[in-house]
Image (cartoon, grey):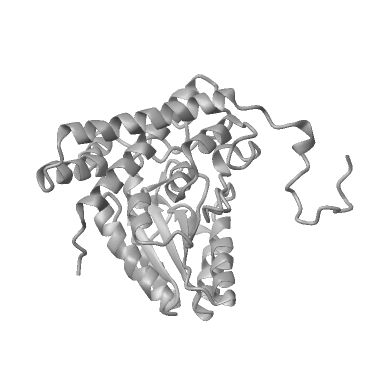
Amino acid sequence: MATKFSKETYLYWYELMLLLRKFEEKTGQLYGMQKIRGFCHLYIGQEAVAAGCMTATNPDDKFITAYRCHALGIAKGISAKASMAELYGKATGCSKGKGGSMHFFGLKENFFGGHGIVGAQIGTGAGLAFAEKYRGTDNVTLCFFGDGAARQGMLHETFNMAMLWDLPVVFICENNHYAMGTSVARTSKTLDIYKMGDAYEMPADTVDGMSPEDVHNAVMRAATRAREKGGPTLLEIKTYRYKGHSMSDPQKYRTKEELEEYKEKDPIEHVLKVLQNDFKVSDADIEAINDRVKAEVEESVQFAEESPWPDDNELLKDVYVQEDYPYIVD
């Protein structure tokens, strides 16, 4: 049964999704100005996934994802300032300026990346869940990956072990329909990725990723199952990215009509209408949120601009846990 959501929940979703959208739009602008270098993958269009997952989980639950990681990191609690500084490669970044766009990390926020190798986070996510089970906690791990990573052998090995050990993990395929520039239909006979769970008797479902309500409900069910020692769940959350795979993507593989079709389902506009029509939130209150988000993004840019670069002596730090590791030569 669908949950009836409060005005406070919709306000939270609206402000969070707007922050993620505006942060990513600013990131794209700064990338064009060469303030941000390297690879850069934006989350614009997929914000409802992050929003729904946040209200369906607890702060102690773990998140791990691939290289499209800015938004999920911010949603989990990494500040916009630390996020922008990381994109700039500054010492005040969430990964001390060493990770950049693809390798966000926040230990105290329980955000474990940000992984550049396609599908690598699937095995690591199961490992995080194993640690929670070993420690006897009620925490759940949400392991995010894209439709392209569903072709990796890591997924099948991990699904098998996760089910065998009843790990408290929710595997979330953010299916935005294109692995880089290749549609799911060109890479798989199975177009419904959630059905891949059947081979391992893993509970699975498909979810409307443009709806924070649907995402919340599905993730809540899966997280509850995991907390009650029911093991993993696979959720195929069907979403859509408005921008290219990365900043260098010309997007010639899809039509403008397809893009506009999904923009008509924009989750931020949907939540805004609910606030205005169902909860009678005033234009002044909405404008206050908009101004707050704008200020937070602008402050993050100023913080990144004014932050120092990492010192040279940081180069070999944080590579190994063992501080006196003998095979590092200064």
Residue 211 is at least partly visible in this image? no
23 vs 289, nearest the viewer = 289
302 left or right of 21? right
253 vs 113, nearest the viewer = 113
Q: How many labels does the image show?
A: 0
Q: From the image, which quarter does the C terminus lie in?
A: top right
Residue 197 position in % (x across, y down): 41, 71
Q: Give the residue at x 57% y 65%.
A: 128
Residue 11 position in % (x across, y down): 25, 46
**From the viewer's perspective, is residue 183 above or below residue 86?**
below
Residue 241 is at least partly visible in this image? yes
**From the viewer's perspective, is residue 217 above or below residue 248?**
below
170 left or right of 205? right
Residue 100 position in % (x across, y down): 59, 37
Q: From the image, which quarter does the N terminus lie in?
A: bottom left
Residue 246 position in % (x across, y down): 47, 35
Q: Give the residue at x 36% y 65%.
A: 194
217 vs 173, nearest the viewer = 217
Q: Give the residue at x 36% y 48%.
A: 177
16 left or right of 148? left
Tell me where residue 131 sits by quadrant: bottom right
- List the single residue furthest toward the top: 33
**From the viewer's perspective, is residue 258 above or below residue 56?**
above
Q: Give the residue at x 49% y 26%.
A: 301
